Image (tube, rainbow, N blue to C red):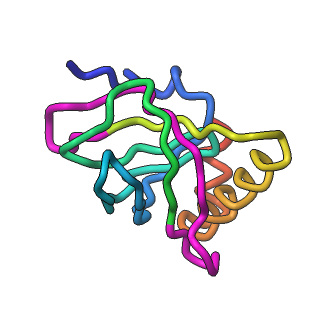
Amino acid sequence: MDADFKGPEKRSHVRAPIELKVDYKRLNGFFADYTRNISRGGTFIGTPNPLPIGTRFDFQLAVPGVPAPVRLLGEVSWLREEGPQPGMGIRFVFGDDAEREEFEATVEKLMIDHLGPLLYQKLKSR
């Protein structure tokens, strides 16, 4: 069953189509998948083997321009099990406001670098 968001009106953050490498542990194995998009509040990880909804897990994002992978805690919010891009929607979980603000600044810079300031501002104002 596809529990994907059904349109931009359900999203509280601007999303940009950016592919980043994601590394995470599942049971006793390590996985490397890729994001399909990212926002300040979450990301979509394309994978044919998503984790169950509600699962919290640590993962690392390889962000261009950032020397070390960014370590994050995420929670699986929804699944897309069928279609051309199966995967899982991840909501970022932060320990405090300072951690959230630091990551949001990283994502905003990444989006501006990837999309350009003009397109980013257009998406942000929608």
Closer to us: 9 or 22? 22
Q: Nearer the viewer, residue 96 or 85?
A: 96
Residue 18 in the image: state x and y as whole percent: 45, 59
Q: Position of residue 48 (x, y in %)?
A: 18, 45
Q: Residue at x 44, y 50 (%)?
A: 37
Whole-percent x, y for residue 76 in the image: 43, 32
Q: Is residue 110 above or below residue 45?
A: below
Outermost residue on the left side: it is 83
Say if the magenta span includes residue 74.
yes
Q: Does 65 sit above or below residue 83?
A: below
- Tell me which residue sits at (81%, 40%) in the image: 96
- Asked if residue 7 lies left or right of residue 125, the reply is left
Asked if the stretch drawn in magenta spans residue 14, the answer is no
Which residue lies at the image location 19% right of the left edge and 31% below the top edge? 81
In which quadrant will I find the N terminus?
top left
Quadrant in the rendering for residue 53: top left
Between 119 and 36, the one lying in front of the other is 36
Span colored in magenta: 62-87
Give the percent coordinates (x, y) of residue 38: 51, 49
Measured along the vertical axis of the image, is residue 27 above or below residue 102? above
Left or right: 104 in relation to 41: right
Left or right: 68 as drawn, with respect to 35: right
